Image: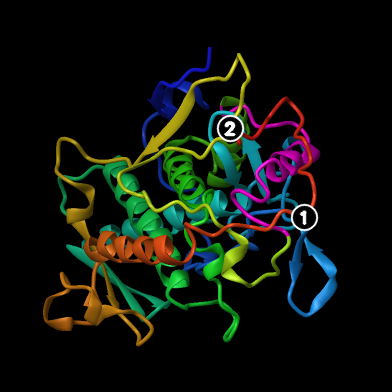
């Protein structure tokens, strides 16, 4: 019988045994400046995807269980990143996961440095993405180290959500190369939230941050039942080609991806492949960590953004006085606007059938 019960991930019970909060163990010059918004190569959902103007090139950015290497703050060639399919958490983008863990470490390090100087709050500029971004965090003495780790993770997650909003509205790493094709991709939100959860646990560990992350990622992929081979993820991707995405459309056309994930707060349920397997394991949904005894985590910080001209701020009625200045509290309305636009332009998208779909291994099938 197919199980339909959703359970919330409890990292403390399933991963590496972790003790009381310890200082971050990656203090070095790499933490002196904010990481890039995209630290590692970003993956596009799909396989064998064509690129406009390069007919001989096919884009593949997937990985296998045995290809994932050790975690390195700000990345390295040994990490073996890419998208992998897990039977309990759907598609997971390892690069996104690592990026948000590193951002969690950076924000926590920023908090620790300001607290050590006796500052009651910190103000830090985070560069330009859809407009200039400024981070403000209150530093009350009654919050514990673990509280600040959770706040750091929440900041990192909100910044990842902002990246999805920004790319939907025209921001891009390379000028004139739109990235809407990757905005709100079905694996992004889950991978980002998983990354900040693992980042928080790595900060709590007695191990150095990078070593703790390596062990946590390994344990988590086992817990989520990641498919073992790269070819398994390839087949999983192909099992929904023509339904969730198409490799007959070339990047960076936004119509490469049809299925998107807009439900990003406060919990995310993974997008699992339709299956008739009798032994389907329990699905693992993720929720944002919080401070239940000390109020909402996001009351302790603000991400202030002054929107550039690409955003439809005048059409968003809840943004007072048509202001271009927003905070993370305005993100849900911007997501809602993006979802409404998606419903008009993408939800009814029908891909033309051109060839039979490759049947996935492990009896992963597509419902018609």
Q: Dot 1 lies on which element?
A: loop
Instruction: Report the mark closest to the observer, 1 or 2.
Output: 1
The residue wearing badge 1 is: 354
- Looking at the rendering, in which quadrant would you find the C terminus? top right
Crowd rating for badge 1 (residues with CA inside 10 Å; few <14, some 14–19, many 20+): few
Real-space Cα distance between discs 1 and 2? 21 Å
Picture layout, residue 44 above or below residue 293: below
Q: Residue at x 70, y 40 (%)?
A: 239
The residue wearing badge 2 is: 274
Q: Is residue 139 visible in this depiction of the protein? A: no
Q: Nearer the viewer, residue 347 or 104?
A: 347
Q: Residue at x 34, y 57 (%)?
A: 155
Q: Is residue 22 visible in this depiction of the protein? A: yes
Q: Residue at x 54, y 43 (%)?
A: 208
Q: Nearer the viewer, residue 29 or 122?
A: 122
Q: Is residue 241 highlighted in magenta?
A: yes
Picture layout, residue 123 above or below residue 222: below
Q: Dot 2 lies on which element?
A: loop
- Image x and y of residue 285, in percent: 42, 33
Q: How is the image coloured?
A: rainbow
């Amino acid at each position: 019988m197919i199980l339909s019960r959703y359970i919330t991930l409890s990292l403390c019970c399933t991963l590496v045994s972790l003790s009381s909060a310890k200082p971050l163990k990656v203090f070095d010059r790499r933490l002196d400046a904010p990481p890039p918004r995209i630290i590692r190569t970003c993956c596009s959902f799909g396989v064998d995807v064509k690129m406009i103007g390069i007919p001989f090139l096919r884009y593949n950015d997937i990985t296998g269980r045995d290809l994932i290497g050790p975690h390195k703050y700000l990345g390295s060639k040994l990490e073996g990143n890419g998208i992998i399919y897990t039977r309990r958490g759907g598609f997971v983008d390892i690069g996104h996961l690592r990026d948000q863990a590193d951002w969690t470490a950076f924000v926590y390090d920023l908090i620790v440095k300001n607290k050590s100087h006796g500052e009651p709050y910190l103000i830090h500029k985070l560069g330009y993405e859809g407009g200039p971004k400024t981070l403000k965090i209150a530093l009350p003495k009654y919050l514990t180290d673990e509280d600040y780790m959770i706040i750091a993770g929440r900041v990192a997650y909100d910044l990842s959500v902002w990246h999805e909003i920004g790319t939907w509205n025209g921001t891009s790493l390379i000028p004139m190369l739109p990235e809407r094709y990757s905005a709100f991709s079905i694996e992004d939100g889950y991978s980002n939230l998983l990354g900040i959860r693992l980042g928080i646990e790595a900060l709590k560990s007695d191990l150095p941050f990078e070593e703790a992350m390596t062990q946590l990622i390994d344990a988590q992929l086992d817990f989520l039942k990641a498919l073992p081979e790269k070819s398994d993820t390839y087949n999983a991707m192909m099992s929904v080609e023509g339904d969730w995405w198409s490799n007959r459309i070339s990047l960076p056309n936004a119509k490469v991806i049809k299925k998107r994930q807009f439900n990003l707060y406060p919990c995310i349920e993974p997008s699992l492949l339709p299956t008739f397997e009798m032994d389907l394991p329990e699905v693992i949904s993720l929720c944002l960590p919080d401070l239940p005894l000390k109020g909402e985590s996001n009351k302790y910080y603000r991400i202030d953004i002054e929107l550039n001209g690409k955003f439809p701020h005048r059409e968003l009625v809840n943004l007072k006085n048509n202001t271009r200045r927003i905070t993370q509290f305005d993100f849900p309305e911007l997501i809602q606007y993006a979802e409404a636009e998606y419903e008009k332009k993408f939800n009814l998208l029908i891909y033309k059938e051109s060839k039979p779909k490759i049947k996935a291994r492990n009896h992963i099938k597509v419902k018609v």
